[in-house]
Image (cartoon, helix red, strand yellow):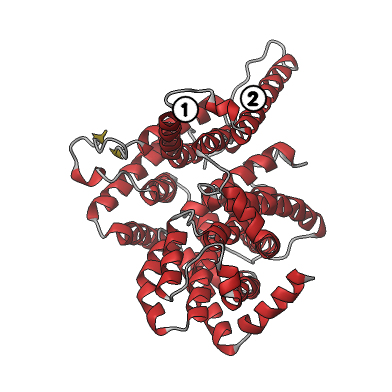
Amino acid sequence: MDVLHNLAFGFEHALTLQNLFYCALGCTVGTLIGLLPGLGPLSTISLLLPLTYSIPTGGSIIMLAGIYYGAQYGDSVSAITMKIPHASSIVACIDGYQMTLKGKTGLALFTAGISSFIGGTVAIAVLSTLAVPLGEVGLLFGPADYCALMLLGFFCVSFVSAGNLLNGLAMAMVGVLLGMVGTDVNSGVARYTMDLPFLTDGIGLISIALGCFGIAEVVKNLDSKNVLTPFNGKIKLMPTWPEFKRIIPSALRGSVIGSVLGIVPGGGPVIAQFAAYAADKKFSKYKHEIGSGAIEGVAGQAAADEAAARTSFIPLMAIGIPENAVMALMMAAFIVKGVQPGPNMIASHPDLFWGLVASMWVGNCFLVILNVPLVRYWLSVFKIPYTVLFPAILFFCCVGTFSINNNLDDIYTTCVFGFIGYLFLRLDMEAAPLLLGFILGPMLEENFRRTMLLSRGSFAVFVSRPISATLLGAISLLVIWQVLSFFRTQSKRPGQTIVSDPVGL
């Protein structure tokens, strides 16, 4: 009953005309930012942060939060229709773009929109009921536990990879090597930079994602003799009842996964989408279709992405620890307004905390209106002939890459990875495992070094800590399961060679 009372108190603040305006503004700006390839909430919030000085505290926080989770909604549009992802919509490129090629663009976008609504609703319930106790769980994680969590993330390669598992692991290792480019955080020594100054800060994730997915796909389409139009004809938006029944279990499963990983520092939307996709490939009734345009491949990752974006506020508001760069900017916004995030925030500023939580559900409703009924209008731009559209795609890719650091070298890097991504497509190699390795590799290295320093070189710490021991045990069981599944499949095909059946990403 206390939760319902607190939510009612929060809605009193969230439903004022002023806060409704800022919520709608944030959601609209976030959706537009998500639609533009390469741009993201980090750069947008950093640009708008100075405006919070002239905006009331509640309205400014609600607006900035709306930009963040609104971008998670909108970024699936460019990923599904043009295969141009943001960091949090990489997995949407796999089945979402395959649905577009099959003429199911409207269905894919509806699935992403309604699944995001489900994920956001579940996350808000978690945020309102378990913010303080679940935030304290994040404090229990040490460096060894993060190492085990990252290793579990690498196991997702076997599910994200639609083709040969060995190829997927090889691509993940390439991603790990790319993640090591730059300055070593411990020694300060430049690694693998080839004496190029702009590589001292490392290679940007956006450059790799836009290159290997966006530019590579454009070059592949231009290399084709077919005259391509990304979307043409009537839009089938509403799913049939059997299709809708396939969306719900996957969305609920992704919501739970995203809600959990959003709480853990180092998790967040990027890791959550891979974990949800891996769960669907293992537990869905239609797992044999995932990778070739299945609804589950869109629903689960969209729900996990949105759920993780909401629950990532838990470590910030309940503990005072930002789990990613966007949350660090949100923390700066709180401090600018004279509010210190942490255990005392709920007691000291209940109107701000519960007003923000309630505004998230209001924003959820705004985003459903923006992303489901208005899908027909969003897609009207994709009726433009591809010969006219692809220069605009390349332009937005370059603008999105340049806007992060205002550096032309980032555009050159993106073009290089566009060529590399095109080679991957021609060789039937998948880029998604590479991005997974690029994201997890540096995190694993940093936490492993920290673990070794704290344990003075002893590996026993990984099995002496309950959380890391449990995660390593789960990894062992999953590896055994995978090996047994491989031999079981091989025994059913005597005298045959198992070959991969990769799906072009």
Q: Is residue 207 visible?
A: yes
Reading the image, the residue beneath label 2 is 476
**In terms of secondary structure, where does tag 1 sit?**
helix
Of all residues, the one furthest to the top in this rendering is: 495
Reading the image, the residue beneath label 1 is 170
**In terms of secondary structure, where does tag 2 sit?**
helix
Is the residue 397 above or below the residue 287 in the image?
below
Tell me the kind of residue under disc 2. Ser
In the image shown, does 345 or 196 lie closer to the viewer? 345
Q: Is residue 83 visible?
A: no
In the image shown, does 265 or 499 lie closer to the viewer? 265
Tag shown at residue 278: none
Q: Is residue 244 left or right of residue 303?
A: right
Quadrant position of residue 395: bottom left
Residue 494 locus on image (x, y percent) = 72, 12
Q: Residues within 10 Å of mark 1 (few under 14, many from 20)?
A: some
Total tally of numbered discs in the picture? 2
Q: Residues within 10 Å of mark 2 (few under 14, many from 20)?
A: few
For the N terminus, the quadrant is bottom right
In the image shown, does 25 or 4 lie closer to the viewer? 4
Residue 61 locus on image (x, y percent) = 50, 74
Q: Which residue is pictured at 40% across the width and 68% down the height? A: 44
Residue 308 locus on image (x, y percent) = 59, 55
Which of the two marks, 1 or 2, is nearer to us in this view?
A: 2
Q: Is residue 257 left or right of residue 420?
A: right
Q: Which residue is pictured at 39% across the width and 84% down the height? A: 54
